[in-house]
């Protein structure tokens, strides 16, 4: 399996693993991961299909350095490009209207909400300080070809915000999946797919994904999703 370099500041969560799997349900050879961090989604895409052409966009240079280590370790230099840039400023860096899939695990908290993390790196990852939902959806819409897929995860309380923003930039919500920790718990996450230029009128609601089984361990589906991945401390 692939090994992914992580650090105290740049690592990945279950949400990232779930989004990588959700966005990988269907085809599409040319893909972009916006705000890639240490590159987990981009690398997991390539783990499943070595023939993909992936672009990973990340504003923080240290995270890009980690990803470049993972790329070299896993020998996928010919399949992935790392763009150290703000996702709002990709004109001239990436071709617009050419990609099949764009994914993003965005900051979950609105700027000014909650208690900001004093570490700038984590603040950028968790709060909308550097980019908003509109910034993410605008960038995704510009990059995707007509009919291309945009996949995002977020907290359930922000579902209306995400759908509103997606439609504002011609990304029609088409598939929704809720994620629960276990039976009887409220959903903690949603996974949403939109289509560039898609028609309104139908959105598929997929079966709920349960992280734990009745015994408190990983559910059978989670075991399949996680597979045998490894993280390497930098």
Image (cartoon, grey):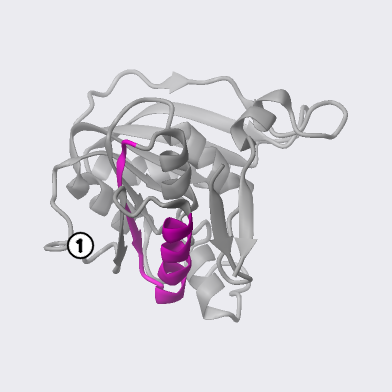
Q: Helix or strand or loop: what does disc 1 sit on? A: loop
Q: How many marks?
A: 1
Q: In this view, does 212 lie to the left or right of 104?
A: right
Q: Give residue 34's position: percent from left, percent from top.
A: 36, 54
Q: Give residue 74's position: percent from left, percent from top.
A: 47, 52
Q: In the figure, residue 186 lies in which quadrant?
A: top right
Of residues 232 and 164, the one drawn nearer to the viewer in this rendering = 232
Instruction: Report if residue 56 is visible in the image.
Output: yes
Region of the chain picked out in magenta, as a range: 51-73
Name the residue beneath numbered marker 1. Answer: 90
Of residues 112 and 185, the one drawn nearer to the viewer in this rendering = 185
Q: Give residue 117's position: percent from left, percent from top.
A: 60, 75
Which quadrant does the N terminus fall into? Answer: top right
Q: Give residue 113's position: percent from left, percent from top.
A: 55, 67
Q: Is residue 89 left or right of residue 112?
A: left
Q: Which residue is drawn at 58% across and 80% down?
A: 119
Instruction: Report if residue 155 is visible in the image.
Output: no
Look at the picture and state if 90 lies above or below 97: below
Q: Which residue is drawn at 22% across and 45% down?
A: 141
Magenta stretch encompasses residue 108: no
Q: In this view, does 119 lie to the left or right of 27?
A: right
Q: Residue furthest right?
A: 215
Of residues 106 and 81, the one drawn nearer to the viewer in this rendering = 81
Magenta stretch encompasses residue 72: yes
């Amino acid at each position: 399996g692939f090994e992914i370099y992580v650090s105290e500041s740049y690592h990945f969560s279950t949400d990232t693993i779930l989004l990588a799997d959700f966005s990988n349900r269907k085809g599409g050879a040319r893909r972009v991961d916006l705000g890639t961090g240490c590159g987990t989604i981009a690398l997991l895409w390539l783990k499943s299909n070595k023939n993909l052409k992936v672009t990973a966009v990340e504003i923080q240079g240290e995270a890009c350095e980690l990803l470049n280590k993972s790329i070299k370790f896993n020998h996928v230099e010919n399949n992935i490009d790392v763009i150290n840039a703000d996702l709002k400023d990709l004109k001239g860096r990436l071709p617009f209207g050419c990609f099949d899939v764009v994914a993003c695990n965005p900051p979950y908290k609105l700027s000014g909400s909650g208690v900001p993390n004093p570490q700038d790196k984590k603040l950028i990852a968790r709060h909308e300080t550097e980019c908003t939902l509109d910034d993410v959806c605008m960038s995704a819409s510009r990059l995707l070809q007509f009919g291309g897929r945009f996949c995002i995860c977020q907290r359930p309380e922000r579902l209306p915000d995400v759908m509103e923003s997606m439609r504002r930039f011609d990304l029609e919500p088409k598939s929704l999946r809720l994620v629960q920790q276990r039976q009887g718990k409220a959903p903690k996450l949603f996974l949403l797919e939109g289509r560039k230029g898609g028609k309104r009128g139908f959105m598929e609601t997929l079966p709920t994904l349960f992280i734990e089984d009745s015994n408190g361990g990983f559910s059978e589906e989670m075991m399949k999703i996680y597979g045998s991945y490894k993280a390497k401390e930098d």
